[in-house]
Image (cartoon, grey):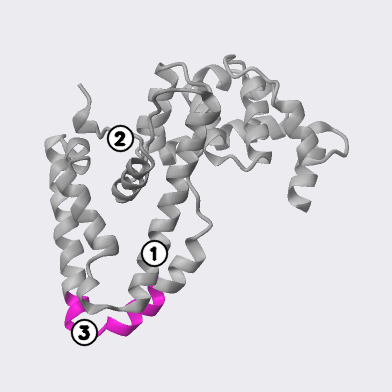
């Protein structure tokens, strides 16, 4: 990748491959609040295409922005621009789950690396499958039922935002079964082959996610892990893990 090659050259000061740069940065401590350390780790995760942990460094940089900001006038142009950009990124992301929940929790628990377990390799073929079945039923009563289902579904969980119990609500068994029905079973009675293909691809992606979680458990030799996913993923990932013999607790099951 020419872009990664050029960035490795810019950041290392000499021609090197992204792999060389990754190996160099991988020994950097993840416990220091020093700006140079944080920027170095950001570069490492960027070159490694690790978006979650790259943004974890952005989270720390914006958290200590007031401290780093004191030195903006003494920094070179690249470093000054870099730190300002991290502040913008964090401000944009602050109400989303990573910056609002996952990163603060990881910091509080002393977790320095977040294991990425998602698998987006099915994005393209899932979009193609969606286009096929949606085109077939777009002007039918089935489509009207489909849109009504999601309007009702969305209104249900959005109403919980005002009562501050949305997390518990979207982690309930009943809600997750309903989300799975809408995502992969709402047209079972139509026997639409394109919709079945769409649902199969969806389950395939979540199977990959579950297997990646199992891989983390095995590699680290731990008995418990905490996994964060959007609520649409919870039912199929939980189902796949349970089929493999793992016990999965939802938020409502925790004391």
The structure residue drawn at horizontal position 46% and vertical position 73%, both measured from the top left corner, is 128
In the image, which disc is placed on residue 140?
Answer: 3
Where 195 sits versus 184, above or below? Answer: below
Q: In this rendered view, identify the residue nearer to me: 84 or 42.
A: 42
Q: Distance between the residues labelled 3 and 1?
A: 23 Å
View extreme (right): residue: 14
Q: What element carries label 2?
A: loop
Q: In this rendered view, identify the residue nearer to me: 65 or 235.
A: 235
Q: Is residue 96 magenta?
A: no
The structure residue drawn at horizontal position 27% and vertical position 82%, both measured from the top left corner, is 137
Lower position in the chain sequence, tag 1 or tag 2: 1
The structure residue drawn at horizontal position 62% and vertical position 32%, both measured from the top left corner, is 42
- Give the foreground label among 2 and 3: 2
Lower position in the chain sequence, tag 3 or tag 1: 3
- Give the foreground label among 3 and 1: 1
Q: How far apart are marks 2 and 3 (CA)?
A: 39 Å
The residue that disc 1 covers is 200
With 28 as the anchor, is 106 left or right in this view? left
Q: How far apart are marks 1 and 2 (CA)?
A: 22 Å
Find residue 62 and report its horizontal and vertical position in percent: 49, 27
In the image, which disc is placed on residue 24?
Answer: none
Q: Does the magenta stretch include residue 137?
A: yes
Work out whether residue 88 can be spotted.
no
Q: What element carries label 1?
A: helix
The residue that disc 2 covers is 248
Q: What element carries label 3?
A: loop
- Which stretch appears magenta? 130-144
Find residue 80 and report its horizontal and vertical position in percent: 65, 30
């Amino acid at each position: 990748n020419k872009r990664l090659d050029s960035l490795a050259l810019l950041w290392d000061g000499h021609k090197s491959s992204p792999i060389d740069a990754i190996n160099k940065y991988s020994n950097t401590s993840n416990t220091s609040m020093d700006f140079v350390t944080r920027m170095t780790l950001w570069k490492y995760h960027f070159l490694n295409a690790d978006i979650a942990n790259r943004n974890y460094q952005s989270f720390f940089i914006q958290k200590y922005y007031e401290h780093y900001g004191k030195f903006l006038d003494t920094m070179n142009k690249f470093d000054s621009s870099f730190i300002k950009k991290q502040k913008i990124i964090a401000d944009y992301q602050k109400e989303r789950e990573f910056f609002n929940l996952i990163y603060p929790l990881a910091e509080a628990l002393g977790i320095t690396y977040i294991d990425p377990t998602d698998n987006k390799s099915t994005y393209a073929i899932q979009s193609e499958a969606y286009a096929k079945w949606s085109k077939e039923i777009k002007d039918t009563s089935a489509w009207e039922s489909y849109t009504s289902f999601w309007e009702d579904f969305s209104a249900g969980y959005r109403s919980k935002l005002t009562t501050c119990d949305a997390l518990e609500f979207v982690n309930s068994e009943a809600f997750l079964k309903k989300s799975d029905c809408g995502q992969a079973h709402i047209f079972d009675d139509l026997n639409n082959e394109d919709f079945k293909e769409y649902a199969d691809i969806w389950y395939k992606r979540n199977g990959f996610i579950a297997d990646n979680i199992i891989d983390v458990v095995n590699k680290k030799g731990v008995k418990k892990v905490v996994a964060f996913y959007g609520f649409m993923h919870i039912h199929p990932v939980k189902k796949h893990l349970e089929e493999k013999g793992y016990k999965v607790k939802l938020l409502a099951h925790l004391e």
